[in-house]
Image: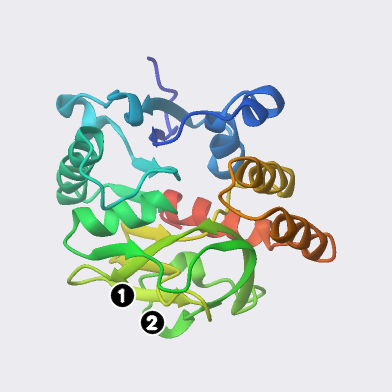
Amino acid sequence: MAIDCGSRRYAMLQAVQDSDYVEKVYGGYYNVYVQAFGEEGDVWDLFRVYEGDFPEFNDLHKYDGFVITGSPSDAYGNDYWILKLCFILQIIVGMEKKVLGICFGHQVLCRALGGRVGKSKTGWDIGYREVNLMKDVGGCYRYLDHHEMSSFLSIIEVHQDEVYEVPVGAEVIASSEKTRVEMFAIADHILGIQGHPEYTTDILFNLIDRLRDMDVIEKGLAEDLKCQLESAEPDQECWKMICRSFLKGK
């Protein structure tokens, strides 16, 4: 694939099958992520890692960054594709490429680098969650250094697993009342985010309905969640700015 001079190339490591809703409305999660984090001129290659589709080892050097998506799978599971993902992430991190992990991606990145993940001791977190950004952790995290941005940002959350311990050398750079490790970073090339900066509210509503229909959450809870969400908005544009700034090295 030809790349224009000055363009950046990213690999999206998709760890979730497209839902019928996302496929119909957005054309798949690929488009959701590229619309959220991409910029004009970028090249994004899609790899459905949950199906065993991975970039070739000899091609890893061609990418400026990698994004690992969310997933219904457990990041601490031992499915072959999850173990292979951990292995390839270790190689990518060793190359000091930019790696952004979202939800499952945040957790599996932590696991691959020697941290600990598991079921949340406080159960599901679904909806909007206020996250405290620890801007004083260090100057290398330039993507948090936006003076007009609040230290408290609301983000969409849909998870029942969490990071227990970050890898050696990592810093926790955001937390919430529910989840101690909402974000972690290593130097300026690794960033994990527990929430979903790429999700839109309609995607969240559809996911709540699907969890209800699968009896994962009770009908009453699903309706309560949707009522609560109608009176608030997540800080999606700020989160997108953080992710884009990270990937671009700004």
Is residue 199 left or right of 42 when viewed as pictured?
right
Residue indicated by mark 1: 171
Q: Residue at x 17, y 71 (%)?
A: 168
Judge by depth and name the residue closer to the eye, 73 or 134. 73
Identify residue type, mark 2.
Val
Residue 141 image point, x, y percent: 40, 69
Q: Which residue is mark 2?
A: 137
169 shown above or below 17: below
Locate residue 120: give its quadrant.
bottom left
Residue 86, position in %: x, y? 20, 45
Q: Quadrant of the N terminus?
A: top left
Q: Disc 1 marks which amino acid?
A: Glu
Q: Which residue does the image show at 63% across and 23% down from the upper left? A: 27
| Rendered residue at 23%/37% (across/down) | 79
Residue 28 location (% of width, % of height)? 58, 27
Give the CA distance from mark 1 to mark 2. Answer: 8 Å
Q: Nearer the viewer, mark 1 or mark 2?
A: 1
Residue that appears at 70% across and 41% down: 206
| Residue 39 visible in this rendered orientation of the protein | no
Q: Is residue 182 left or right of residue 188?
A: right
Disc 2 residue crowd, few under 14, some 14–19, many 20+, Cα 10 Å? few
Q: Are marks 1 and 2 in contact (CB under 8 Å)?
A: yes
